[in-house]
Amino acid sequence: MLRKKRTYSLVAILALLPIYFVATPTIAQASDPCSPSSKVAKSPNVGAVQFKNVKQSIKGVSYPAGGILLPPDGITFAGLSRRHQPLSSDQGTSVVIWHTDYNKCVNKLNAIKSAKIGDSIKVTDENGEVKNYKVTRKVSVPYGQYESDWFIQNGPRRILFVTCTGKFVNKHYTNTLVVFGSPA
């Protein structure tokens, strides 16, 4: 009889274990507030950008027709607009974009903000080829007020490096910095 009672107790415990684990809150692992979402983090790199001693990988990003191009979440990589030319193109405009900061973490690619006309920026394309671009122009515009001729699909080759600047108001920055680069 004692043996039967033990078996019953073990069966009862085993039956209650799933309820215990469902009802007991799990302890969340501390996550890095600067890390990107898992969906974006898993997408493949399409290149890299290097300015002085700062190097960062680039992932492709999409945005809806008529929508605003937003950089990928996080500060560990930049985004390449899929609506514009790939990094390996020999004509038209490629657009590289990144968050100035994310969850109070500053992006190291902000070093490009200090670029001066004539400075060199290296870009590794999706084929692994390194190309040098020379900064030819820097423009700060009100948030979202770009000129359409900056984003040509054909014509002379160039690359735009785009990020936010200005004051942080209503969950976004007031200005956008656009750094133009032409093949060196």
Image (cartoon, helix red, strand yellow):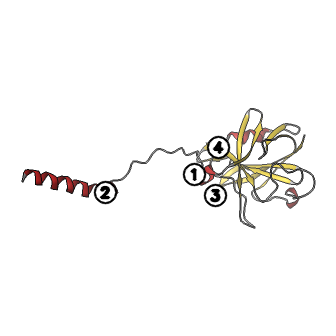
Hey, which quadrant is residue 85 in on the image?
bottom right
Q: Are marks 4 and 1 in contact (CB under 8 Å)?
A: no
- The residue identified by callout 3 is 170
Q: Are marks 4 and 2 in contact (CB under 8 Å)?
A: no
Residue type (three-letter) at the residue carrying disc 3: Asn
Q: Residue at x 67, y 42 (%)?
A: 107
Q: Are marks 1 and 3 in contact (CB under 8 Å)?
A: no
Q: Is residue 1 toward the left or the right of residue 54 in the image?
A: left
- The residue identified by callout 1 is 38
Q: Residue at x 68, y 39 (%)?
A: 108
Q: Position of residue 183 (x, y in %)?
A: 89, 43
Residue type (three-letter) at the residue carrying disc 1: Ser
From the viewer's side, name the closer residue of 125 and 78. 125
Q: Which mark is residue 26?
A: none
Residue type (three-letter) at the residue carrying disc 2: Pro
* Label 3 CA crowd tier, 10 Å (few <14, some 14–19, many 20+): few
